[in-house]
């Protein structure tokens, strides 16, 4: 390990993160009863300009009056390039800061963006005497944000998670997409002809680099990497496939833009019984190996060593987190 310790963000369960527009208060009560880890009430892209002010009021009222249970509550403020943002922060944190766990900052481009919001939130928290520190979730969804992702990840002790905002990222990079978070047939490999002349098309994941880049920046700074939206809520298989790809790369959670997607995210992002069983057997096998002075042994015909212990411990830790949620 490096001599430089990595401080981990608070251990918050973040398998599913449900987006609810602040302009749709009729959806709030139902959302509060869903099995979802984090809810973000949106003031940004799901809210039309002439509804921003009312949405802010709806959100403040809802945070104060609705029983959200033990869910983590977040509000997505407007971007720093708009004139809505300062009032989003001031009004929401001043009037509902006690129940607010997180602020989601969209289209973060530089570490200075984080600093600016941090300064505002710090002043409001101090003025109001809040005991709890509000955390930050950053959406990495522009070319600039991806370029500066490491600096953004390190920019504030409030930082908890990085989110891949695939829709805006596509717009910013001018990627050719079909549906939000979906794949594109044109991003594929054509195999060389087989003996009979036949060829196959293997679809690739056009988001692989961006997501993997963000995961590295998040983990190097002790933050949770979270995958963003999947637009086709009538395609659970497509959602599951996207969530699994993200989980395989190290993401801890995925957005749900529809309640039905929250259950899918919880399912994919929770350790499976077979994973838990294997992790427990790894820990036992390594404990036995240690007694006989060995640092590496075989389990089911495969090598395991101290790195396997660390992977198993991470998984068991997640199981405990889910169990106490
Ligand atoms: C989320 O905000 C996205 O743009 O995908
Ligand atoms: Mg966006």
Image (spheres, rainbow, N blue to C red):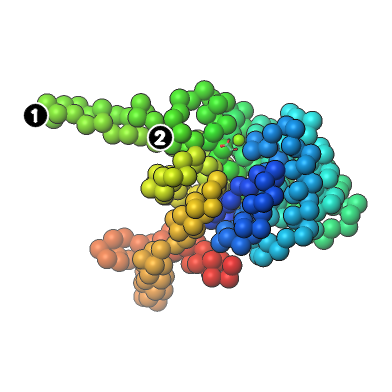
- Provide the secondary structure element on which disc 1 rests: loop
Report crowding for label 2: few under 14, some 14 to 19, many 20 or more residues within 10 A (C-alpha).
some
Task: For residue 8, say whether it is visible.
Answer: no
- 118 vs 275: above or below: above
In the rendered image, which quarter is residue 8 located in? bottom right
* Residue 206, percent from left and from top: 42, 32
- The answer to whether the residue labelled 2 contacts the one labelled 1, judged by CB atoms less than 8 Å apart, is no
Q: Of 244 and 17, which appears nearest the observer?
A: 17
Q: CA distance from mark 2 to mark 1?
A: 29 Å
Query: Of the residues under marks 2 and 1, which one precedes in the sequence?
Result: 2
Q: Of 119 and 32, which appears nearest the observer?
A: 32
Please name the residue that numbered disc 2 is placed on.
183
Residue shown at the point (49%, 53%) measured from the top left: 260
Residue shown at the point (89%, 54%) measured from the top left: 128
* Residue 7, percent from left and from top: 65, 54
In the rendered image, which quarter is residue 119 located in? top right
Please name the residue that numbered disc 1 is placed on.
196
- Provide the secondary structure element on which disc 2 rests: loop
């Amino acid at each position: 390990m490096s001599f430089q310790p990595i401080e981990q963000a608070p251990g918050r369960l973040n398998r599913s993160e449900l987006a609810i527009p602040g302009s749709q208060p009729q959806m709030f009560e139902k959302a509060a009863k869903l099995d979802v880890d984090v809810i973000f009430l949106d003031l940004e892209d799901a809210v039309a300009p002439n509804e921003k002010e009312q949405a802010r009021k709806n959100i403040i009222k809802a945070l104060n009056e609705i029983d959200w249970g033990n869910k983590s509550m977040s509000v997505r403020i407007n971007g720093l390039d708009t004139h809505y943002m300062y009032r989003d922060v001031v009004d929401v944190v001043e009037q509902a800061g006690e129940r607010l766990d997180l602020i989601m900052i969209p289209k973060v481009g530089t570490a200075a963006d984080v600093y600016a919001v941090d300064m505002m939130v710090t002043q409001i928290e101090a003025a109001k005497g809040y005991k709890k520190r509000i955390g930050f979730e950053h959406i990495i969804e522009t070319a600039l944000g991806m370029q500066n992702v490491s600096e953004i990840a390190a920019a504030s002790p409030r930082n908890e998670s990085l989110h891949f905002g695939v829709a805006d990222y596509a717009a910013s990079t001018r990627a050719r997409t079909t549906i939000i978070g979906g794949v594109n047939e044109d991003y594929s490999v054509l195999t060389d002809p087989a003996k009979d002349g036949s060829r196959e098309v293997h679809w690739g994941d056009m988001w692989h680099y961006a997501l993997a880049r963000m995961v590295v920046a998040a983990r190097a700074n002790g933050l949770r990497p979270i995958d963003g939206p999947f637009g086709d809520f009538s395609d659970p298989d497509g959602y599951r496939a996207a969530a699994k790809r993200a989980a395989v790369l190290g993401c801890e959670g995925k957005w749900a833009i529809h309640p039905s997607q929250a259950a899918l995210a919880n399912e994919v992002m929770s350790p499976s019984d077979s994973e838990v069983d294997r992790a427990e057997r790894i820990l036992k096998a390594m404990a036995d190996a240690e007694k006989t002075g060995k640092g590496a042994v075989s389990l089911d015909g495969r090598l395991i060593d101290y790195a396997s212990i660390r992977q198993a411990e991470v998984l068991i830790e997640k199981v405990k987190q889910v169990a106490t949620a």
